[in-house]
């Protein structure tokens, strides 16, 4: 694929105002920053529902304007955003070819369904434009990691430092982000075996010098990969 240093973005949302706002953010991001942040983001297409998105993406595939990043609303008029992603993945369009970030206005996002579809993560629609832009660039550069924490990029960087120091791998980091789920749910969300989840946990326990899942959760909260535990 060509122009791999540029994010060629396809936006799917049934609200015209949101699609317009997203496009405006991209234009302002390029125009107001000196030098412009990298990688550059350019909008190459939009759709208002799942059917239109699948038709347009199919038509655009393997052309000069092939999208390499999909920003899609979870609740579309005709289907779920996760269903669109799942369909694309079943057609052989991999996460390396088309990164996918799901937008949701739901308070409790359906994490399992979003990740099981092949998405790279999700983001609340309540987040500011700077967080959306940071999330897209992060996912584009590191597609093997999940974006699940809606906190600002600074917290992500702080987490990176702590995880690098501990020797935590990208696969182990993804498990850490989902520790509020059961092992079976983590396995389903990440499309790995339950034994693999246990291996990742045991490896992390050894690296972090801890002995329990609770301590692992406390570490994940400390570095910003999980929200603060209440109660």
Image (cartoon, helix red, strand yellow):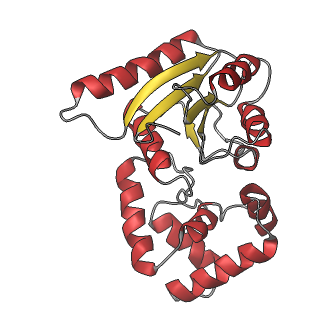
Q: In the picture shown, does residue 99 fall above or below 13?
A: below
**Which residue appears farthest toward the top when viewing the image?**
16
Label total for image: 0
Q: Nearer the viewer, residue 165 or 3?
A: 3
Q: Nearer the viewer, residue 32 or 221?
A: 32
Which image quadrant for residue 84?
Answer: top right
Name the quarter where the C terminus is drawn: bottom right
Q: Residue at x 76, y 45 (%)?
A: 113
Which image quadrant for residue 104?
Answer: top right
Name the spot of residue 179 as percent of width and height, x first: 65, 65
Name the spot of residue 49 as percent of width and height, x first: 71, 18
Q: In the picture shown, does residue 40 fall above or below 113?
A: above
Q: Residue at x 68, y 21 (%)?
A: 59
Q: Residue at x 44, y 65 (%)?
A: 223
Q: In the picture shown, does residue 174 fall above or below 100?
A: below
Name the spot of residue 41 as percent of width and height, x first: 40, 31
Q: In the picture shown, does residue 166 fall above or below 186?
A: below
Q: Nearer the viewer, residue 88 or 226?
A: 88
């Amino acid at each position: 694929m060509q122009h791999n240093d540029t994010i060629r973005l396809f936006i799917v949302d049934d609200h015209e105002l949101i699609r317009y706002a997203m496009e405006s953010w991209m234009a302002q991001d390029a125009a107001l920053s000196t030098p412009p942040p990298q990688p550059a983001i350019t909008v190459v297409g939009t759709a208002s529902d799942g059917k239109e998105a699948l038709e347009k993406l199919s038509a655009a595939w393997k052309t000069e304007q092939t999208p390499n990043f999909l920003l899609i609303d979870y609740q579309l008029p005709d289907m779920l955003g996760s269903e669109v992603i799942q369909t694309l993945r079943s057609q052989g369009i991999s996460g390396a070819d088309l990164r996918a970030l799901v937008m949701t206005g739901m308070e409790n996002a359906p994490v399992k369904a979003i990740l099981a579809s092949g998405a790279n993560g999700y983001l609340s629609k309540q987040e500011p434009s700077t967080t959306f832009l940071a999330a897209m660039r992060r996912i584009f550069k590191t597609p093997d990691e999940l974006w699940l924490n809606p906190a600002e990029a600074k917290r992500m960087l702080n987490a990176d430092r702590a995880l690098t120091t501990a020797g935590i791998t990208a696969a182990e980091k993804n498990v850490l982000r989902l520790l509020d789920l059961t092992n079976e749910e983590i396995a389903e969300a990440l499309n790995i075996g339950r034994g693999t989840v246990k291996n990742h946990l045991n490896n992390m326990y050894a690296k972090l010098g801890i002995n329990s899942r609770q301590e692992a959760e406390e570490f994940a909260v400390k570095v910003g990969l999980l929200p603060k535990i209440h109660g």
